[in-house]
Each structure stands twice: as structure tokens, then as C-alpha cells.
Image (cartoon, rainbow, N blue to C red):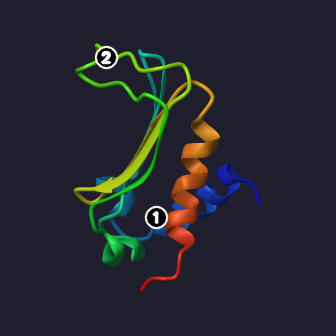
């Protein structure tokens, strides 16, 4: 199953109760350019695994030091403050979704 289909099923499974009203999944474009994916973990089974962690970083992500532009090949995914966040260049949306899937599919310690 590809990452988008997996995310659709994961999202659907979370839409019991108020989670979809108060929280959810956001996929947006960035002007540097690139993608940003934010997934609120509160109220999901993944909430018990929420520890701040850098999951993946490669290339030169946008930062204050590089004028918020970043390189042409970059990605950064992390779990922080109750959310998964993934950002990357225009060709990294699939990789961001795969990073979330791989983290979510890990057996909890």
C-alpha cells in the first residue's frame, strides 16, 4: 500500500469522536519552495509515543542562517510538542509521508 493510501486509512481510523474537529492532518506548500506536513498526535494511539525526536534530516533545510531558503535537496521530520512535522523540498512529499508511516508503524517500546 502506498503512503497516501495508508495515511487515508490512518486518518479515517482517528476520526472517532472529536479528533477530526479539533485536530487533524495538514499538508501545505511552502514558499521556499517545498512541503509541510503537520499531524496532531493528541487523542490518537500514537500520543503515548510522543517524545520529542528528530526522525530525519538531510540536505540543507531552511533556517535563519540561510535566509529561510534551504538547498535544492532537503528534508526534516520530527515529533515535537504533540505533533509530527515534516518539511522538505518540492520532491519530498512522498518521503515525508513515508517517514510518518515508518514512525507510526514501529512497535511501541
Using the image as rendered, state which of residue 104 and residue 8 is in the foreground. Answer: 104
Q: Residue at x 47, y 20 (%)?
A: 71
Using the image as rendered, state which of residue 19 and residue 100 is in the foreground. Answer: 100
Q: Quadrant of residue 54?
A: bottom left
SS at mark 1 in the image: loop
Using the image as rendered, state which of residue 60 and residue 26 is in the foreground. Answer: 60
**Vertical relation: 79 (above or below) 34:** below
Q: The N terminus appears in which quarter of the rendering? A: bottom right
| Tag of residue 15 | 1
Left or right, 47 with reference to 55: left
Q: Residue at x 53, y 26 (%)?
A: 89
Q: The C terminus appears in which quarter of the rendering? A: bottom left
Q: How many numbered marks have been drawn onto this rendered protein structure? A: 2
Left or right, 15 with reference to 65: right
Q: Residue at x 61, y 55 (%)?
A: 8
Q: 10 Å neighbourhood of mark 1: few (<14), some, or many (≥20)?
A: some
The residue where tag 2 is placed is 66
Q: Furthest residue to the right?
A: 1
SS at mark 2 in the image: loop
Q: Find residue 85 and report its horizontal and vertical position in percent.
A: 38, 47
Q: Residue at x 67, y 53 (%)?
A: 3
Q: Quadrant of residue 68?
A: top left
Amino acid at each position: 500500500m502506498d503512503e497516501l493510501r495508508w495515511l487515508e486509512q490512518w486518518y479515517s481510523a482517528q476520526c472517532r469522536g472529536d479528533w477530526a474537529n479539533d485536530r487533524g492532518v495538514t499538508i501545505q506548500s511552502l514558499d521556499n519552495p517545498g512541503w509541510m506536513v503537520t499531524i496532531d498526535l493528541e487523542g490518537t494511539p500514537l500520543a503515548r509515543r510522543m517524545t520529542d525526536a528528530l526522525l530525519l534530516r538531510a540536505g540543507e533545510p531552511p533556517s535563519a542562517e540561510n535566509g529561510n531558503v534551504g538547498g535544492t535537496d532537503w528534508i526534516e521530520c520530527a515529533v515535537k510538542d504533540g505533533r509530527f512535522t515534516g518539511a522538505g523540498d518540492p520532491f519530498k512529499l512522498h518521503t515525508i509521508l513515508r517517514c510518518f508511516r515508518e514512525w507510526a508503524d514501529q512497535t511501541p517500546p
